[in-house]
Image (cartoon, grey):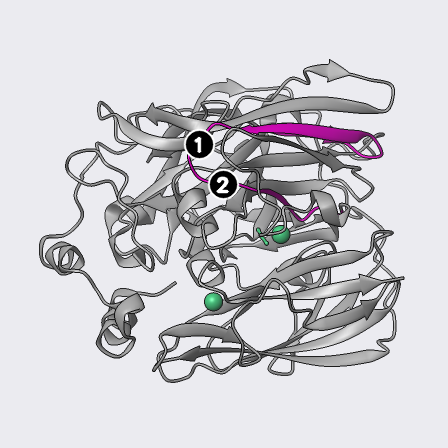
């Protein structure tokens, strides 16, 4: 996130691309555009998309990329980009081992590409920035779902356009479920996705887009709604927390001090549950947590707080209202969730340096801007590599992260301090705060070869070329 302080610094030194427009200065002076009555609206749950065909070899889904209007602020129509008219897009429920084919039609006037974030997919279905769907055209993506069950999400990835198009609405949830569920974690109506993001809605109801406009994105949306409430019974719930924001980080806590029992990370279940009083999510990170409301009396109101918020609207992001009494709860959180993955020995070590060139006003990986025709690293399929990722920017203190397509990796340590259990594995996006070095162990265990991007997932950075790519060879 570029916060107000360093956004101003960047504006002063960063040249045209980072210059702070007058409107931002107005907002700094006058505060956010909207004050919305908190917790008035019920939490919307994204619809689960039905397959348009169930074939012997695959479930077929259709997504139409287009434009619609929605009420982000109650009573105010705002134009957004949508999948099948929905904001955020519909949830795709895939099953492990069963192929999903997604037929995408682009009705926009700009190109789009869909990337399955966290997915292990063939290179031609990865939504590579150059593999775009031109206006009026269609493309079919094949997702084989040959990976563990987990909370994935899909989003736009068109070259230089992804930051704006994701911001305008092009993202949705993609859940891979176990073919044979082996646990009794809360499920069905008690398994609730919470897609978190922010937005800058101007006084005329327009969704205002501005690259590096983080300081003005003063509304936090949960599943597309500002400060909603959810009625819950006295029982356990599984919450799928997904940070789909361009640049905002969330530090989440429950106002009654109840704990989150984290059962899953980016790419699936953790080996065992971890009890946490706070959960931090950087852009694109996910946490599956179980929250137990059985000890709360009817009438209790529990606010999901974001300790990093700068205003009430961004601090009190939704409320759980306990009502309806006890419910028979057959769910449980087992002491062991999955087998811990085997730790392999790396055969290659690489350095990845994340930096900001203040003179050019650009973000760089190993000193370079993204070139879709350049292969930065050639990786042999099946091998394990150690990547040392350093955020060199101590001057402006700009946070960066690193996301690898295609695989889930293990985070070893940050500045020599071993990664916490909940961050160790399976991860596809890792936080790299200014001035720190994070080491990850990446096993390229996908059967597919080809070119895949890796990038910072502050997508205002990646869409201005803070991206590089690997070529996986047999
Ligand atoms: Cu979620 Cu290449 O990104
Ligand atoms: Cu990705
Ligand atoms: Cu970055």
Residue at 36% x, 32% y is: 80
Relative to 302, 272 lies left or right = right
* Residue wearing tag 1: 108
Residue at 58% x, 19% y is: 327
Q: Position of residue 314 (x, y in %)?
A: 31, 48
Judge whether 199 appears above or below 184 on screen: below
- How many numbered marks does the figure carry? 2
The Cα atoms of the two marked residues, 1 and 2, are separated by 7 Å
Q: Position of residue 277 (x, y in %)?
A: 51, 54
Residue 284 image label: none
Q: Quadrant of residue 404?
A: bottom right
- Secondary element at tag 1: loop
Q: Position of residue 136 (x, y in %)?
A: 51, 28
The one nearer the camera, 455 or 136, is: 136
Quadrant location of the C terminus? bottom right
- Secondary element at tag 2: loop
* Residue wearing tag 2: 111
Relative to 318, 382 lies left or right = right
Q: Look at the image and tell me whether residue 301 can be seen.
A: no
Label 1 Cα crowd, 10 Å radius (few <14 / some 14-19 / many 20+): some
Judge whether 332 appears above or below 10 on screen: above
The one nearer the camera, 276 or 286, is: 286
Residue at 33% x, 57% y is: 211
Q: Mark 2 and mark 1 in contact (Cβ < 8 Å)?
A: yes
Judge whether 190 appears above or below 341 on screen: above
Quadrant location of the N terminus? bottom left
Q: Quadrant of residue 2?
A: bottom left
Q: Which residues are magenta?
A: 91-120
- Whether residue 423 appears in magenta in the rendering, the answer is no
């Amino acid at each position: 996130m570029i916060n107000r302080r360093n956004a101003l610094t960047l504006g002063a030194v960063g040249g045209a691309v980072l210059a702070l427009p007058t409107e931002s200065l107005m907002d700094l002076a006058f505060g956010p555009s909207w004050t919305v009555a908190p917790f008035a609206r019920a939490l919307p749950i994204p619809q689960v998309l039905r397959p348009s065909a169930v074939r012997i070899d695959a479930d077929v889904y259709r997504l139409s990329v287009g434009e619609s209007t929605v009420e982000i602020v109650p009573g105010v129509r705002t134009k957004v980009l949508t999948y099948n008219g929905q904001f955020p897009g519909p949830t795709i429920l895939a099953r492990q081992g069963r192929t999903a084919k997604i037929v995408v039609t682009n009705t926009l006037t700009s190109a789009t590409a869909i990337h399955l974030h966290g997915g292990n997919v063939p290179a031609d279905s990865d939504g590579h920035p150059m593999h775009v769907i031109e206006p009026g055209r269609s493309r079919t993506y094949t997702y084989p779902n040959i990976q563990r069950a987990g909370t994935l999400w899909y989003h736009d990835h068109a070259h230089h356009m992804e930051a704006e198009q994701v911001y305008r609405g092009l993202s949705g949830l993609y859940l891979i479920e176990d073919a044979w569920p082996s646990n009794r974690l809360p499920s069905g109506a008690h398994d609730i996705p919470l897609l978190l993001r922010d937005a800058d809605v101007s006084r005329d109801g327009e969704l205002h887009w501005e690259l590096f406009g983080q300081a003005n994105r003063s509304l936090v949306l949960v599943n597309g709604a500002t400060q909603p409430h959810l009625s819950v019974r006295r029982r356990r719930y599984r919450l799928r927390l997904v940070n789909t924001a361009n640049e905002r980080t969330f530090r989440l806590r429950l106002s009654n001090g109840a704990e989150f029992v984290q059962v899953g990370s980016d790419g699936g279940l953790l080996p065992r549950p971890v009890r946490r009083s706070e959960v931090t999510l950087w852009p694109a990170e996910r946490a599956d947590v179980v929250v137990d409301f059985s000890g709360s009396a009817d009438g209790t109101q529990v606010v999901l707080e974001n300790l990093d918020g700068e205003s009430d609207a961004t601090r009190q992001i939704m409320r759980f209202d306990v009502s309806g009494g006890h419910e028979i709860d057959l769910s449980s959180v087992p002491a062991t969730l999955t087998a811990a993955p085997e730790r392999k020995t790396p055969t290659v070590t690489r350095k990845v340096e994340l930096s900001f060139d203040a003179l050019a006003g650009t973000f760089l990986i190993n000193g370079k801007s993204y070139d879709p025709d350049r292969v930065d690293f050639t990786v042999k399929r099946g091998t394990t590599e150690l990547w040392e990722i350093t955020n060199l920017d101590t001057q402006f203190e700009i946070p960066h992260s690193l996301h690898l397509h295609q695989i889930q990796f293990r985070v070893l340590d940050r500045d020599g301090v071993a990664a916490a259990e909940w961050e160790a594995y399976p991860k596809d996006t890792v936080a790299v705060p200014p001035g720190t070095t994070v080491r990850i162990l990446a096993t390229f265990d996908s059967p597919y070869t080809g070119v895949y991007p890796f990038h910072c997932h502050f997508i205002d950075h990646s869409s201005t070329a803070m991206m590089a790519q690997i070529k996986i060879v047999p």
